[in-house]
Amino acid sequence: MFISKLNLTTLPECTGKANCEFTTPDGIVWNLGDFLDNDFKEGNPSRTSFIMIDVNGPRDPNCFQEACAAGIDPDRFRIHIQPNGKMFIDERDETARAAIHASAKVQKEK
């Protein structure tokens, strides 16, 4: 369902794959990590998966906040997902917390 909302012309084949990666028309690379792993899907409460977002695709710097050189802005972010559907951004990832916003509002398709 998540992938179907990303305006893709063809859906990636992600069934049963770890680190399923695809690019949306705006050039953003998405990596679903182990989100599709059976242990995660079966609701193991100790598991947390992630979605990795690279906002400029393969262009540099290709780093997360904790791995970028001093003075370099990160272009990769992680959204952590718990089996119960709760999502969060690590509190130490200040750049991602400032850049990514979510709404609790659920919209019905028309």
Image (cartoon, rainbow, N blue to C red):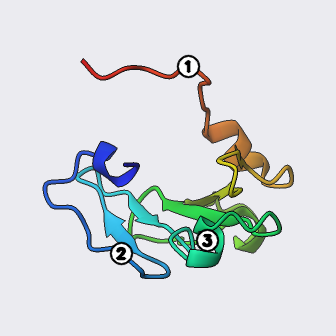
Compare marks 2 and 3 and give the one earlier in the sequence.
2
Three-letter amino acid code at the position of disc 1: Lys
Q: Nearer the viewer, mark 1 or mark 2?
A: 2
Distance Cα–Cα, label 1 vs label 3: 31 Å
**Front in this rendered view, residue 98 or 1:** 1
- Residue drawn at point x = 36 percent, y = 75 percent: 15
Residue denoted by label 1: 105
Residue denoted by label 2: 15
Compare marks 1 and 2 and give the one earlier in the sequence.
2
Three-letter amino acid code at the position of disc 2: Thr
Q: Sort mark 2 into few (<14), some (14-19) or many (20+) by Cα contacts within 10 Å.
A: few
Three-letter amino acid code at the position of disc 3: Cys
Residue 80 coordinates in the image, percent (x, y): 69, 57
On the image, which quarter does residue 73 sit in? Answer: bottom right
Residue 86 coordinates in the image, percent (x, y): 70, 45
Distance Cα–Cα, label 2 vs label 3: 27 Å
**Front in this rendered view, residue 62 or 28:** 28
Residue 35 coordinates in the image, percent (x, y): 55, 68
Q: Is residue 98 visible?
A: yes
Mark sitting on residue 63: 3
Q: Nearer the viewer, mark 2 or mark 3?
A: 2
